[in-house]
Image: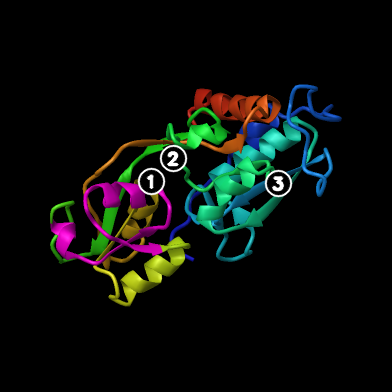
Amino acid sequence: MRGGVYTLSAAALVLAAMLSAGCSGRDADAPPPPPARTNNVLLLVTTTDTRPYSYCDDETGEIVGLEIDIARAAAAKLGCKLEIRKEKFPNLLTMVSAGEADMAASGITITEGRLQTVDFTVPYATEGGMFLYRAGEEMPTMIRAEKMRIGTMDASTYDFYLTSHGLDPVRYGSYVDAMDDLKAKRLDAMFFDSCAVRIDAENSNGEFAASRLETRENFGIAVRKGDTRLKKALDMVITAGKRRRRRW
């Protein structure tokens, strides 16, 4: 996994006051759960490599992060258990829209196109896209990137942004795989979420640097269309966290 530790140690204290039990099923107007799962289990799918939102702890191997804290708090608020499953990024929204998962979270940008197939929570973070590149080399820009080998996450808004500017990036199903190729100099730069890029740059001991911000986007957790009960619980957790001046 990438270096750096994103501290969320106060999350339990912030969330404890918001948790309440008493959920024994879905509202009548909410979509029924897929037959493979029961009412008291909520399935979250994620890539587990979008630090600080959802990633594997280097020491314990546990899936942790901001999105995990939010989803876990919402599940507890509904009296449900949270199950987390690792999936490739292009599969996340498809699984939610098909009813194979209740939630998807992996630094997913809220877009009009995606809102046609899934619903999103209120934004828990506003970030954007920027380049991660080797320090000492020329900083990538969209014009310079035309002559560079750029890596990005397949089917992400960063992929679409590069493509809309006439670029043909190297597409990855995992941020970690792209990072490995950047370290091995098989890429000139990566284009990804600014928060993750800054963390990697800051923890690279001067090996990498972050470019200027190229885009600005709102991130949310995706839920199935019409699942107002789960969306409301997630929105309440995110809004309460913002009031307490946390990062969501």
Q: Which of marks 1 and 2 is nearer the N terminus?
A: 2
Q: Residue at x 64, y 40 (%)?
A: 71
* Quarter assignment of residue 171: bottom left
Disc 1: which residue: 157
Q: Which of marks 1 and 3 is nearer the N terminus?
A: 3
Mark 1: secondary structure: helix
Question: Does residue 163 show up magenta in the picture?
Answer: yes
- Locate residue 186 relative to residue 78 in the image: left or right: left
Given contact means CB atoms under 8 Å apart, are the residues at marks 1 and 2 in contact? yes
Q: Which amino acid does label 2 sit on?
A: Thr
- Locate residue 179 relative to residue 7 in the image: left or right: left
Per the rendering, the mark at residue 109 is: 2
Q: How far apart are marks 3 and 2 (CA)?
A: 20 Å
Mark 3: secondary structure: strand
Q: Give the range drawn in magenta.
A: 144-171
Which sits in the foreground, 121 or 165? 165
Q: Distance between the residues labelled 1 and 2?
A: 7 Å
Please tell me how crowded label 2 is: few (under 14), some (14-19), or many (20+) other residues with Cα within 10 Å: many
* Quarter assignment of residue 226: top right
Per the rendering, the mark at residue 43 is: 3
Q: Which of marks 3 and 2 is nearer the N terminus?
A: 3
Mark 2: secondary structure: loop
Which sits in the foreground, 112 or 22? 112
Please tell me how crowded label 1 is: few (under 14), some (14-19), or many (20+) other residues with Cα within 10 Å: many
Given contact means CB atoms under 8 Å apart, are the residues at marks 1 and 3 in contact? no
* Quarter assignment of residue 213: top left
For the question of whether residue 46 can be seen, the reply is: yes
Whether 18 is drawn above or below 183: the answer is above
Q: What residue type is labelled 1?
A: Thr
Q: Residue at x 55, y 24 (%)?
A: 239
